[in-house]
Image (cartoon, rainbow, N blue to C red):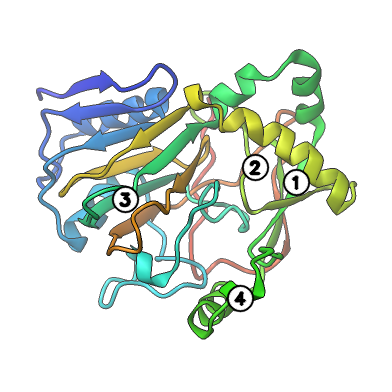
Amino acid sequence: MSLDIQKVTANIGARVSGVDISQPLDEETVSALREALNVHKALVLDDVDLDDAGHQAFARHFGDITTAHPTVSAVDGAANVLPVDSERGRANHWHTDVTFVLNPPQATTLRSITIPPYGGETLIASSAAAYRDLPEPLRRLADTLWAEHTNDYDYAVPDEEIDAEKAEQRAEFTSIKYRTAHPVVRVHPLTGERGLFIGGFAQRIVGLSVGESRKILDLLQSYVTRPENILRWRWSPNQLVIFDNRITQHYAIDNYDGLPRRLHRVTVAGDVPVGIEGKESYSIEGDASHYTTVAAPVAA
């Protein structure tokens, strides 16, 4: 094994070389990649020679994989692969993948398929660094809070921007309604780190009004999106990025003038989040058993 791992920023991200992920990986290499993901939160691999089957095989090194999405259709012939396609909508808001279900994915893998000649970067933020940045009074408050996450909420999009295609996409996304309560501060099951587990699907603090919740969530989110906590990744052909969905957020920048942009996504089944007092998240509405198995919890 000649695995080489080079940090990209102080708080998040590393480039990995010296491994051909299109080939079967030995346990030593897999362990090194898992440890690198724990440390750096996001890994970038260049010049990957993968099709959808190879992409899924690589993701399985980190655990069972989910189906493509709880409500959105998969790539034809690949039920576990989600097309992240500019023609099907743009995720240009900060979020952690699928936090509206009880056990969101533990890891997300994205592979470049079609890259615009400019723009189209993906931002990935460390919610662990964000938690560390909180002043002590805010940290103590965040430790006590729970938030309700949902896929069905008011996006506040002007009527003139809603056409028939966007309405159809939204109807598909909310075809099964989910609501789940998660701790605002999640304890990572492998590292024991604490991270702010919020993002775009977190719509209300349990016990507070929507208005009160928005003020608190916006304040906490401002620490996640500090520039020093963000990896801004400009895609190249044949790249794969994997990030720890338990302790990051991400944002796909819509800055490429509507040019074609397509990635393929495969996610790894996750465990049920746990707060600092050991209490697990709980489902309020929606069954996601068709989408994901529940990964066994792992002691830090």
**Crowd tier of the residue under label 2, counting other residues whose Cα lies within 10 Å: few below 14, some 14–19, many 20 or above:** many
Residue displayed at 58% across by 79% down: 171
Q: Is residue 119 visible?
A: yes
SS for tag 3? strand
Q: Relative to 233, is 196 on the left or the right?
A: right
**CA distance for labels 2 and 4:** 29 Å
Does residue 88 lie above or below 26 as drawn? below
Mark carried by residue 67: none
Say which mark, if any, is on residue 110. 3
Q: Are marks 2 and 4 in contact (CB under 8 Å)?
A: no
User: Regarding mark 4 in the picture, which secondary structure is present there?
Assistant: helix
From the viewer's perspective, is residue 27 above or below residue 240? above
Marks 3 and 4, how far apart in space? 32 Å
Q: CA distance from mark 3 to mark 2?
A: 21 Å
Which structural element holds mark 2? loop
Label 2 with label 1: CB-CB less than 8 Å: yes
Instruction: Give the amino acid at mark 2.
Output: Ile
Q: Is residue 143 left or right of residue 243?
A: right
Q: Nearer the viewer, residue 180 or 122?
A: 122
The location of residue 169, given as percent across then percent down, is: 51, 76
Instruction: Measure how far apart labels 2 and 1 are at the Cα level.
Output: 7 Å
The residue labelled by disc 2 is 198
The secondary element bearing badge 1 is classed as strand
Tags 3 and 2 in contact by the CB under 8 Å rule? no
Q: Earlier in the sequence, mark 1 or mark 3?
A: 3
Percent x, y of residue 287: 63, 69
Residue that numbered label 4 is attached to: 160
Report the residue marked by disc 1: 147
- Structural distance between the alpha carbons of marks 1 and 3: 27 Å
| Residue type at tag 1 | Ala
Q: Position of residue 274 (x, y in %)?
A: 66, 38
